[in-house]
Image: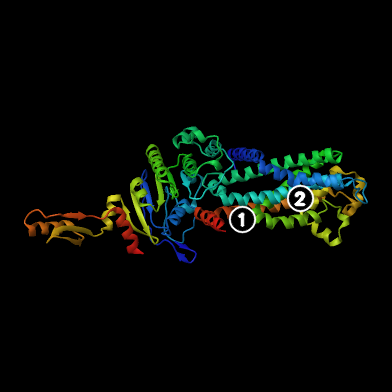
Amino acid sequence: MNYGAVEVLRGVDLDVQRGEIFTLLGPNGAGKTTTIEILEGFRHRSSGEVSVLGLDPERSTEAWRSKLGVVLQAWRDHNRWGTRQLLAHMSEFFDNPHDPDELLDAIGLTAQAGQRVGRLSGGQRRRLDVALGIIGRPELLFLDEPTTGFDPEARQEFHRLITKLATAEGMTVLLTTHDLAEAEKLAHRTAILVDGQVAVCGTPSELAEAVNTQSHVLWLEDGREQVLTTSDPSQVAWELHQRFDGPVPGLTIRRPSLEESYLNLIGRTS
Amino acid sequence: MNLKILRIGVRRGWAEHTHLLKDRKELITSMIGTVGVFAGLILWVGDTPVEGANVNAATFMTAGFLAFTVFGAGLMTFPMALTTDREEGTLLRLRTIPGGIPAYLVGRATTLMCQIVVQSVLILATGVIVGGVTLPHDWLTLTWVLLLGTLAVVPLGAAIGSLLPGPKTAAGILIFPLMGLMITSGVMLPMTYMPEIVHSIAQVFPLYWQGLGLRSAFLPDSTLAVEIGKSWRLPQVAGVLTAWAVVGMLIAPWLIRRVTRRESGSRLTERQLAAQSS
């Protein structure tokens, strides 16, 4: 994928299964938004093969469009419309839409039904964007950095909403984020994108394993704390037990957290 | 385009229109903008007779302002709304929805028609009440000239709107050429007051022809003395306005498609960041 003179993506190989919540995780500038925009059919790619719901996004049809839901980062549109009014208007385009009132209830905006969209708070606005994204019962929902600028409470509420909707609808969700905790919490599988390439892809535990950062083994010997860095902590512990011929005083094995692995990975590749 | 999209579009346009009516700031600007200036001008020079024609300035200007209402709505309000919708992500959101862009265009056209009707009625009422203007004698001509004049400028407005860089600069770019056209097109002052060269230029643009058609509906034939060729030239009015409508309709859809295709979430973010930092 060339974007102007700069190559943004090279070799992003991903397979997302139906019904799965999949996150694209990576630092800013890693190519997350470019990837998602190619999948949405909003951006032209210079090479490679892409198939979304069985169709190349660049040859999109209206029928294909109606099966997608898109939630972008920077929408400020329809500010003069009423919240419920906008939801009802957008539902008219689809053959089998959600009931606007039920959806308002699901996103917790029933009290704001008559309020102007421009008067909603940031978090309320994002939830409305999600509702607008799923009003047509899409098979696949794209969420681009949905929780940027959220406080922790709003973020948690948002995560609950996405999980609930995905489970209830059997919808496939593809979301981008630069927040590891978010990916860990929401996603069935995550691909870490660094410098336009998929560095690792898998379930949270697979990720930790794949990154395979060195573990620290600590114990007490000669009245001092000893540290050994190894990729095989179990082997080191076994050798220590043999050497001590019994329990090892103060034995601790410190495995890196997923966050440490992630930061390590970003640092390692860039 | 199917009937469903047409229906959604018309309802969308009506909703947008009612939002504008509820917005006090918007309402006052559009009222004072055109109707206020018109009322002021009538009070100031309305009684002055137009030299060479046996009508007063108020009557002449009522026809002129009607023409300019359509012209301003199509070539100023509409393109500016289009750039705002692009900037705020309205176009992009509708692009993510099947049939969204056609419905958007129907909606915009509907809002514009509503606006033109409201302003035309206000101008006419102001002319009659404030200026003592007699109502037009030829309602049929008035109606078809207004309709055809709208069709002549709306696609053109869409084309302009898709070329403008952004809503903040739009007004500044548009206002001077439009003012220039307004002055040279004979809608405020009789054409024969202007030098020959202005005649040739003005007759290229739709505003002159629309103004001429509207004057034919308002003014007695005795004012023909101040018109080019001493005739209302209605066949030419219809011909030129139709030509503009056709040319506009050929270019506009292509330009709008180009603009909406260029839009994406990251472009929207880039522009909003740029707008915040400037």
Mark whose residue sits in front, 2 or 1: 1
Marks 2 & 1, CB-CB < 8 Å contact: no
SS of the residue at dot 1? loop
| Residue beneath the point at 63% across and 41% down | B16
Chain-order first, disc 2 or disc 1: 1
Q: Is residue B242 above or below residue A169?
A: below
Give B12 or A67, whichever is nearer the viewer: B12
The location of residue B34, given as percent across then percent down, is 75, 46
Give B201 or A179, whichever is nearer the viewer: A179
Q: Identify the chain of the residue marked 1, using the numbered disc in the image.
A: B
Q: In which quarter of the image is the C terminus of chain B?
A: bottom right
| Left or right relative to B49: residue B6 | left
Disc 1: which residue? B166
Q: In which quarter of the image is residue A28?
A: bottom left
- Amino acid type, residue under disc 1 in the picture: Gly
| Residue beneath the point at 34% across and 46% down | A185
Disc 2: which residue? B241
Q: Which residue lies furthest to the front in this view?
A: A223
Q: Quadrant of residue A83?
A: top right
The crowding category of the residue bearing disc 1, from other C-alpha atoms within 10 Å (few below 14, some 14 to 19, many at least 20), is: some
- Amino acid type, residue under disc 2 in the picture: Leu
Residue B214 can be seen in this image: no
SS of the residue at dot 2? helix
Q: Identify the chain of the residue marked 2, using the numbered disc in the image.
A: B
